[in-house]
């Protein structure tokens, strides 16, 4: 082939995640992926799962820089003929190239230097985050700015973390084969999968400490003290801020599950250690562990009554058991939805600078029934890595919800938690990180 060059599925998925409609998975199987060498054109060979023949497609960018089908051919008898079609079409003058386009540019300078988030500066300028930069560009081409202020907030000190979380959720739900209906300002997303719809409102635990150039780790004593009271209160404040808005009463949200998606950005590295405080706050229990004489792990539930604010007010534990929360079908959480997630996804697809080396360390769920601690793993992120957008998501289902969220709408890559008789029953994927950190290294020969 002289005009078409093979590329990985991971790279094609970044370009075409929002181009392909979710339903195509049921009648075609994607086999091979191509580029014309500079990414202006993409090629795809698929097998028709009904007839067993092949489909081919050439995609080019439209005026919004989204990849769209430019030329499609079906009923091709052999894959060799399909490859020949791709190669010929990629060299054809009949293919449309879109130039001088106008598109949604999240890196267009708008926010003043003083109000710009330092992590946005890293994303825009640093070689270390070049992979994330390329991924976020591709994702943003498909993002519909309902509020009209996304770019300003994405760049700003007060809005950057929240907007990164929203972009991550955009990728997660699409990877889970949901379609988006974005005709309303609130809640943030209405998604649909072959009929059933879900309303999602995104929220974060916002920054509580000053931003500084030197990131600081808390001591284990400081972490335990924060987990015992302050962090559950932070989660509670963020969640109830959304409950008060009563999104479920809006006409376009009627009779569907309403879900709050929350992430923790309250301090440096807080998302790496605050995981357990959320489940404790949602269900009102924490758990002690011990081993019997045979080495079997024993779990004992301990009910948590509440938490004390600085003014002395007691806030009850057990969000799902408080008045008003019956309108919340579930809470979605991830400890991994940071810039580093976008960076790793891009790196494993071959995007970004070749001078950057990413070393990821995760504490992840140990499936040994007698394991009382997470397992640990460090690895170099490369094109053989296979991290998904879904990895790290956990869905906490509300046992008292007026409208239950159907767990079958999500695949086996997603962790799901259910509460019964004082215990949290979890369905865990093969790999579920409780926390994740990534070391960025510049390696130049």
Image (cartoon, grey):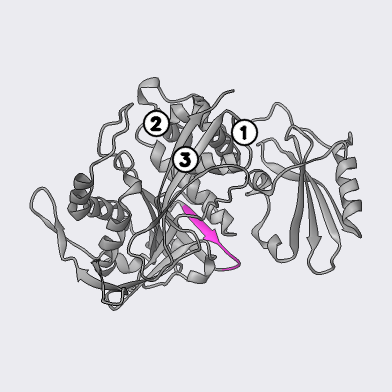
Q: Is residue 18 above or below residue 295?
A: above
* Quarter of the figure with the C terminus: top right
Q: Which contiguous range is marked in magenta?
A: 189-195
Q: Is residue 68 above or below residue 74?
A: above
Checking the image for residue 156, the label placed there is 2
Q: Looking at the picture, how far across and down is residue 187, in whole percent?
A: 43, 53
> Would you call the spot at circle 2 few (<14 residues within 10 Å), some (14-19), or many (20 or more)?
many
> Would you call the spot at circle 3 few (<14 residues within 10 Å), some (14-19), or many (20 or more)?
many
Q: Secondary structure at mark 1?
A: loop
Q: Residue furthest front?
A: 293
Residue that mark 1 sits on = 103
Q: Looking at the picture, how far across and down is residue 122, in whole percent?
A: 45, 28
Q: Are marks 1 and 3 in contact (CB under 8 Å)?
A: no
Is 190 covered by the magenta stretch? Answer: yes
- Upstream in sequence: badge 1 or badge 3: 1
Is 311 covered by the magenta stretch? Answer: no
Quote the CA–CA distance across marks 1 and 3: 25 Å
- Upstream in sequence: badge 2 or badge 1: 1
Q: Looking at the picture, how far across and down is residue 22, in whole percent?
A: 65, 59
Quote the CA–CA distance across marks 3 and 2: 19 Å
- Upstream in sequence: badge 3 or badge 2: 2
* Mark 1 or mark 3, whichever is nearer to me: 3
Q: Secondary structure at mark 3?
A: helix
* Mark 3 or mark 2, whichever is nearer to me: 3
User: Toward the viewer: 62 or 364?
Assistant: 364
Quote the CA–CA distance across marks 2 and 1: 20 Å
Q: Secondary structure at mark 2?
A: loop
User: Toward the viewer: 420 or 162?
Assistant: 420
Residue that mark 3 sits on = 340
Figure label count = 3
């Amino acid at each position: 082939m002289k005009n078409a060059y093979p590329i990985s599925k991971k790279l094609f998925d970044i370009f075409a995640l929002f181009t392909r409609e979710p339903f195509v998975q049921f009648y075609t199987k994607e086999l091979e992926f191509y580029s014309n060498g500079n990414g202006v054109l993409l090629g795809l060979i698929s097998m028709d799962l009904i007839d067993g023949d092949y489909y081919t497609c050439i995609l080019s960018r439209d005026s919004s820089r989204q990849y769209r089908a430019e030329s499609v051919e079906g009923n091709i008898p052999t894959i060799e003929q399909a490859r020949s079609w791709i190669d010929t079409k990629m060299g054809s003058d009949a293919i449309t190239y879109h130039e001088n386009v106008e598109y949604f540019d999240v890196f267009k300078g708008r926010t003043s230097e003083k109000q710009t988030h330092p992590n946005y500066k890293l994303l825009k300028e640093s070689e270390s985050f070049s992979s994330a930069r390329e991924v976020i560009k591709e994702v943003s081409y498909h993002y519909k700015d309902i509020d009209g202020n996304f770019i300003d907030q994405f760049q700003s000190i007060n809005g950057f973390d929240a907007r990164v979380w929203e972009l991550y959720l955009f990728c997660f739900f699409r990877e889970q084969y949901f379609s988006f209906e974005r005709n309303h300002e609130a809640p943030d997303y209405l998604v649909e999968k072959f009929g059933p719809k879900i309303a999602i409102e995104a929220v974060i635990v916002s920054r509580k400490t000053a931003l500084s150039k030197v990131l600081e780790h808390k001591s284990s004593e400081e972490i335990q003290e924060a987990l015992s009271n302050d962090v559950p209160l932070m989660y509670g404040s963020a969640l109830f801020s959304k409950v008060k808005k009563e999104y479920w009463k809006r006409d376009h949200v009627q009779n569907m599950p309403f879900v709050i998606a929350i992430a923790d950005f309250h301090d440096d590295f807080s998302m790496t250690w605050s995981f357990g405080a959320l489940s404790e706050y949602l269900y009102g229990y924490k758990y002690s562990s011990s081993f019997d004489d045979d080495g079997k792990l024993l779990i004992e539930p301990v009910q948590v009554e509440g938490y004390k604010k600085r003014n002395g007010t007691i806030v009850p534990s057990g969000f799902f058991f408080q008045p008003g929360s019956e309108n919340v079908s579930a809470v979605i959480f991830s400890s991994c939805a940071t810039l580093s997630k976008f960076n790793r996804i891009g790196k494993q697809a071959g995007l970004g600078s070749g001078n950057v080396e990413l070393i990821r360390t995760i504490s992840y769920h140990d499936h040994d029934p007698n394991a009382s601690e997470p397992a640990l793993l460090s690895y170099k992120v490369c094109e053989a890595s296979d991290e998904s957008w879904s990895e790290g998501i956990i869905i906490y289902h509300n046992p008292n919800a007026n409208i239950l969220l159907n767990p079958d709408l999500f695949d086996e890559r997603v962790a799901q938690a259910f509460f019964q008789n004082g215990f949290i029953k979890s369905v865990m994927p093969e790999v579920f990180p409780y926390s994740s950190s990534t070391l960025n290294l510049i390696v130049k020969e």
